[in-house]
Amino acid sequence: MPEERRAAERRTKLRRTTDRKVTTGSRLDVILDVTRRLMSITDLDALLRDMAEATTQLLDSDRATIFIVDRERNEIWSRVALGTGSDEIRQAVGVGIAGTVAETGEAINIPDAYRDPRFNPEHDKRSGYRTRSLLTFPMKGQNSRVIGVFQVVNKHGRERFTEEDEETLASLGASAAVAVENAQLVAEQRRLWETLIETLAVTIDARDQQTAGHSQRVTRYAEVIGRGMGLAGIELEKLRAAALLHDYGKIAVRDEFLQKPGKLDDAEFAYMKAHAEKTGEFLAHLEFPHDMREVPIIAAQHHERMDGKGYPRGLPAERILRGARIVAAADVFDALTAPRYYKPAYTVEKTLELMDGMAGDHLDPEVVAAVHRLLKDLEWTLESLKHTWPKPSQEVAPAAEGALSERDQAAVKASDG
Ligand code: C2E
Ligand code: SIN
Ligand code: SIN
Ligand code: FE
């Protein structure tokens, strides 16, 4: 398992630094070394694990646990428990030694846990371990808010942890606090960001019953296609966000156009086309995070065409981003497989036939090829999303089996005649 191997490598590296006899001078070196590495580790769990390793070795102790404060539930939970092989420990703030430290923000350094009435021996009872000396230290963030607790157990060769041990923990704790607070902040912002984008998408889909669910479905299809074409990480995130928001500009399109049962005439279609431009305009107001800057561009390009006859820009193929080509194909895939005011749901076979006809001049042939390759996945996704399709409405005459939109009837006539 790569994650375990990476952890093992980290441990070996750490041991190399800490195996030399830990004297006062080298202790500082180790702290600095750990701190420096902390700032470069992006995975918070890996970081805290490193931290706990360093702590047990620097303090020459048996085991170390790092608790994180869960404010919502007013509890602390063991995010990392080294040397205990135990499950997560959760306890209320104010309960037990660690819980007390979380509440008061004061360190507790005791030689014999069993003489302290706050100590909860349940854990020892279950594991057969015998806790003696205990150093429990608050990890404080900004405004001295306690965000976690370090607990180190059983000092080797001595009765209790020293004052120097407390100082060591204080410096390590300060670095850990910065890292934990940063990680929490990033996670919060990311959630805000994701829910904001989802909310925007839900707003467009709520505009009218018939486009309901369209943004969500296009996003799922684009994800399947994107992943199948080798996109990953931030590229996939950009694609997801752009797909969710691609039709945002429809919020500015009047109902009578959006809901017209038949084919749009030229003037109506010209008006409808403004939605792609609007998407770009509206999204330009959002300050996207640096690595997501392409999202509004991808979204606004979803009706550009490979032959340069798309809208709003009529861009040549080489200027159309790959994400936009994928969203374009996902958009058409949903427009054809799902029912619309102006057309019934087409079968997957009919959809593929029409998309094949669009490959080259309208859609990117590579993306259409990916759609073929990924058909099983797409069909499975389609089935799982059918409940988001617009419900048949009374105003629209139920479509006959095999019926086509006026646009496609016209295309059939043109090719026949
Ligand atoms: P939409 O319904 O989400 O359709 C997205 C794209 O899927 C269309 O972009 C087009 O490339 C493809 N598509 C949709 N329906 C059909 C179809 O019946 N046959 C074929 N061969 N392709 C289809 P397009 O054409 O730029 O249209 C943009 C938007 O304008 C559509 O979004 C829809 O909201 C509206 N629209 C387009 N044509 C009509 C129409 O005939 N009647 C009505 N009421 N609205 C239309
Ligand atoms: C534990 O290891 O169960 C926590 C001990 C305590 O802080 O009371
Ligand atoms: C579009 O059809 O709107 C974009 C053309 C493409 O890149 O496939
Ligand atoms: Fe669109």
Image: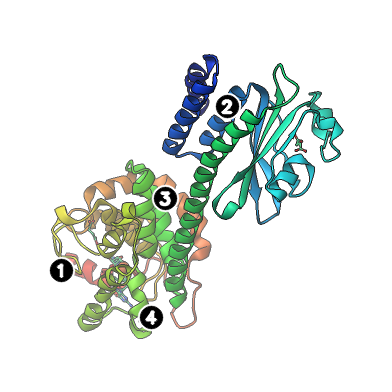
Quarter that holds the C terminus: bottom left
- Residue denoted by label 4: 259
Q: Specify how the rendered protein is coloured.
A: rainbow
Residue 146 percent across, percent down from the top left: 63, 49
Nearest to the eye among marks 1 and 2: give it.
Answer: 2
Whichever of labels 3 and 4 marks the residue nearer the N terminus, that label is 4
Please name the amino acid that badge 1 sits on: Gly
Cβ atoms at labels 2 and 3 below 8 Å apart: no
- Residue denoted by label 1: 417
Towards the viewer: 268 or 325 = 325
Whichever of labels 2 and 3 marks the residue nearer the N terminus, that label is 2
Residue 206 percent across, percent down from the top left: 47, 74
User: Does residue 308 appear anywhere in the picture?
Assistant: yes
Q: Residue at x 18, y 53 (%)?
A: 360
Q: Quadrant of residue 159?
A: top right
Would the CB of label 1 be found within 8 Å of ligand 1? Answer: no
